[in-house]
Structures are given as C-alpha cells and as structure tokens.
Amino acid sequence: MPTDKHWKDYVIPKELDVSAKLDVGEKSYFGVNQRARVERRSGPTAIADRVNEKLAGLSSEQRQRGLPNGDKYDAHAEIHGIQQVIEAGTGNGQHAKMVVNGERICTNCHTDIPAAAEKAGFASLTIFEKQSGKTFIWKPGMTELQEVKQ
C-alpha cells in the first residue's frame, strides 16, 4: 500500500483479521489479509513459481484446494507486505522488520516468507508475532523462519 495515505484508507475494517507492518529502511509497508483489501487484485506474486512447485507435489484433492501466496489475490498479509517492497524495489541490502498482528504465522508462510524475503533482496528479516510473543528471523539462504529462543 502506498505510504502517502493512512493504511486504514486501504482496508475494510470489519474484515481485518491479520496485519503485517513491515519497516524497510525509512519506509513502512502494510500487508493485510485477503478479505480486508479494498483493492483485491489478481496476478502472480514474486514467489508464484515456488508455490506452483509445491502444488505440483500434492494430491489432486489438495491441488484443488490450492495454496496461498502464489497469487496477489490470495496472498496472506505477510506476503502482501513483502510483495509491495518487491514492486517498489526498496528491499536490496536492507535489514527489514515485521510485526504480525491478529493470528500466528501459518505453516505455508513459514516457508513462503523466506522465499519472498530472498526475492526482495533483504539482508535480513526479523518478525515479531504479537499473537504468541515469539520472534523469528530470516537470513539469506534460509528456507524456513527460525524462532529466536528467549
């Protein structure tokens, strides 16, 4: 979402279940769950190929249900935020920080976030999951988020 307006101008409040605030350098990006987006556009995400590879390995019944994050239309809040960074081209070499609010990070996102962070060119990504109080990190080469043990 553009940062020239308040993020609430881009969401449907009663549908807002999950938000992801992503700070990259001096800029902030806001990802929200699918139903909460005022403008819900379709089109491949930067990790669409990866999601399609995962789909190919599933049973036909599982493929029919699909997986999130391969298309902008169904991307989860975390991927929605990182996709904005990719499109803006502001991630290269940056140490990014994200706060996820509303729900815990799902199983798909635990592996999709690293793929998207890699595509964004981040030097690192630190995520605070408000629901659980857990912190996760990602660094280049990692294929899954790693919990920071307190």
Image (cartoon, grey):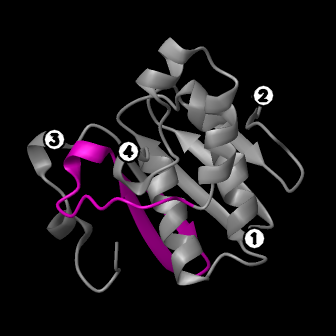
Residue marked by disc 3: 15
**Labels 1 and 2: the sequence-earlier one:** 1
Percent of width and height locating residue 9: 15, 69
Residue 113 x %, y %: 64, 47
Mark toward the start of the polypeptide (1 vs 4): 4
SS type, badge 4: helix
Query: Quick check: marks 1 and 4 in contact, CB under 8 Å?
Result: no
Hey, which quadrant is residue 25 in on the image?
A: bottom right
Classify residue 123 by image quadrant: bottom right
- As drawn, the label of residue 121 is 1
The tag on residue 149 is 2
Tag count: 4
Asked if residue 32 lies left or right of residue 20, the reply is left
Residue at the image position 52 percent from the left and 32 percent from the top: 105
- Res 53 quadrant in image: top right
The residue most toward the front is 60
Which residue, given by chain and number where applicable, does mark 4 sit on?
74
Looking at the rendered structure, the secondary structure element under dot 2 is: loop
Indicate the amino acid at tag 2: Lys
User: How far apart are the two marked residues, 2 and 3, measured between alpha carbons?
Assistant: 33 Å
Dot 3 amino acid type: Glu
- Amino acid at circle 1: Gly
Q: Are marks 1 and 2 in contact (CB under 8 Å)?
A: no
Mark in the foreground, 2 or 4: 4
Marks 4/3 in contact by CB < 8 Å: the verdict is no
Q: Secondary structure at mark 1?
A: loop
